[in-house]
Amino acid sequence: MPPLRVLSALDAARIQWYHFKAIIVAGMGLFTDAYDLFCIAPVLKMISKIYYDNQPVGTAVLSTSYAIALLGTALGQLIFGYLGDRVGRTRVYGLCLLIMVLSSFGCGFSVCTTRRSCVMASLGFFRFVLGLGIGGDYPLSATIMSEFANKKTRGAFIAAVFSMQGLGILMSSAVTMAVCKAFKNAGEGSLEITRAPGIETLAPAEADIAWRLILMIGALPAALTFYWRMLMPETARYTALVENNATQATKDMQRVMSVTMTPPIPEEDSSSETPQQQPSSSSYKLFSRRFLSLHGRDLFAASANWFLVDVVFYTSNLLLAQIFNFSNKHPNSTNVYDSAFEVAKVAAIVAACSTIPGYWFTVYFIDRVGRVKIQIMGFFIMALVYLAAGIPYSWYRSKHEKSNDKGFMVLYGLIFFFSNFGPNTTTFIIPAELFPTRFRSTCHGISGAAGKLGAIVGIVGFLWATKHKHYEEDVFPDVKRVRIAFLILGGVCIAGVLVTYFFTRETMGRSLEDNEEDEISPTSTAGTSSVNVLLPRQ
């Protein structure tokens, strides 16, 4: 059958230059996501000194600023995931990038320079829009990469796209430190008092430009890939299986890749079969009883695992800016640039030593070990680390001694390593491989949106549960409450182990076309490469 010829050729295609080009183009959305996530913590440190009279931003404002971007991301995943299946992946792919670039610049041009309520409202609006674009990029990037990749190295290619987050984290920290250093040197590190209507702040006037510049620079790498993103052809699997145009799918793939096609079927045979070729996924609708019986368990597993890992991952990221301080000065006594510089420095150390190696361990092992085993291992080791850190946390945190900081940071870095060499990466990969072509982008968006809801629960819950009643007494979160939070996060990781073990199916070495069948063998077991057997489509 013509559709199977071109798709079988893709499954067997050798690794070539276009695969790497697609990784870079598709990965820029994830790069921007990580850049925004990690630059907002030092930016809020700067805003607290510029607009909040050197006091920490209130818990309500802080939690809202994080939650609104994550809410936008969740909505973007649902909206653009659905559109990716309805109108095509590449038709909305460029729009997502355009939204990200424009909203990143919008964050930098947030209106007002004197009234903090106005600045935070404007920044919140543009971060919500930025979240829409980032959210849309998640399902589209994963789906496009999975549908371009061959069967043997598909997991490594999708993981490589996701690993662009590591570069985003590193660039975020580097840009923040460079901007802070440059502005500090230009102003000779002065702490002049700047008066504005109704506000007094320990920050030079040009500091209000610095944080805006940090936010805008992150849009530049993504903007540079816009041209190539617009040139990407529609994926062959979407064209052949959803639009029922195998001829166009073949032309598109041969235009950008070298694929070896099997000899064509004789015209008399193909003419008799072609009218009967309909994708099996067209025989039932999303959330129909048929869909739920075939794919309901997969959707639950993907959504639940993503929810659980994002509770842990985003809370852990928030902790970086909350519980680590390697400066010799008390945080409230440092100037506007030093406070942001310290937060970015900690993030850079963790990214270089823990986060980025974790991503690339996954790239190397994902198609050798399998998704399920890596996900279980990651959840399990993270649970052990949280318990090991949580039980003696009072000792680690006692008097905020620097000697305890470094030892604790080594232990804490393991969380980021096994999060990325584990469920943070695999939850991005698995939904792109489990579902029929007609529903793949939508289901990935649903799974990702569940994850972002988990992130909101983790960040907002942690901020409110661990805050001090009086900020001036201590800049660190309450020790006893952080200890309890660590133990709870350990329990969340154990729940991830159980959900993965009992509900998640292995997709390593499995063709995406196995999802197009109407029947799933009742004897299928997780962990095998032949969970589904491709049946002829009638």
Image (cartoon, rainbow, N blue to C red):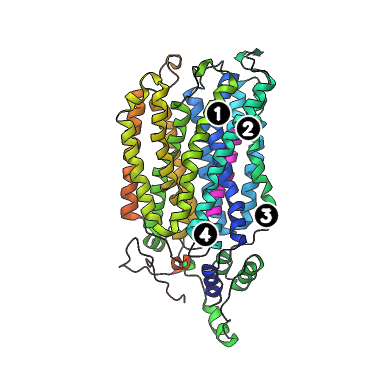
The residue singled out by tag 1 in the image is 42
Q: Amino acid at mark 3?
A: Trp
Looking at the image, tell me whether mark 4 or mark 1 is earlier in sequence order: 1
Taking the spot 62% from the left edge, 43% from the top edge, the residue there is 100
- The residue carrying pointer 1 sits among few (fewer than 14), some (14 to 19) or many (20 or more) residues within 10 Å by Cα, namely many
Q: Amino acid at mark 1?
A: Pro
Looking at the image, tell me whether mark 3 or mark 2 is earlier in sequence order: 2
- Give 97 or 25, whichever is nearer the viewer: 25
Looking at the image, tell me whether mark 4 or mark 2 is earlier in sequence order: 4
Q: Amino acid at mark 2?
A: Ile
Q: In the rendering, which numbered label is found on residue 214?
A: 2
Taking the spot 65% from the left edge, 70% from the top edge, the residue there is 251
The reply to whether the C-beta atoms of the residues labelled 3 and 2 are less than 8 Å apart is no
Q: Position of residue 480 (x, y in %)?
A: 33, 24
Looking at the image, tell me whether mark 1 or mark 3 is earlier in sequence order: 1
Q: Position of residue 210 (x, y in %)?
A: 65, 27
- Give 153 or 194, whichever is nearer the viewer: 153
The reply to whether the C-beta atoms of the residues labelled 2 and 1 are less than 8 Å apart is yes
The residue singled out by tag 4 in the image is 146
Q: Position of residue 66 (x, y in %)?
A: 51, 33
Looking at the image, tell me whether mark 4 or mark 3 is earlier in sequence order: 4
The quadrant where residue 118 appears: top right
The reply to whether the C-beta atoms of the residues labelled 4 and 3 are less than 8 Å apart is no
The residue singled out by tag 3 in the image is 228
Mark 1 lies on a secondary structure that is helix
Q: Which stretch is magenta?
A: 125-143
Using the rendered image of the protein, determine whether residue 396 is visible from the camera's viewpoint.
yes
Work out how far the residue at label 2 is from the one at label 1, CA to CA, in angstroms: 10 Å
Work out how far the residue at label 4 is from the one at label 2, CA to CA, in angstroms: 33 Å
Q: Amino acid at mark 4?
A: Ser
Q: Is residue 62 above or below residue 284?
A: above
The quadrant where residue 123 appears: top right
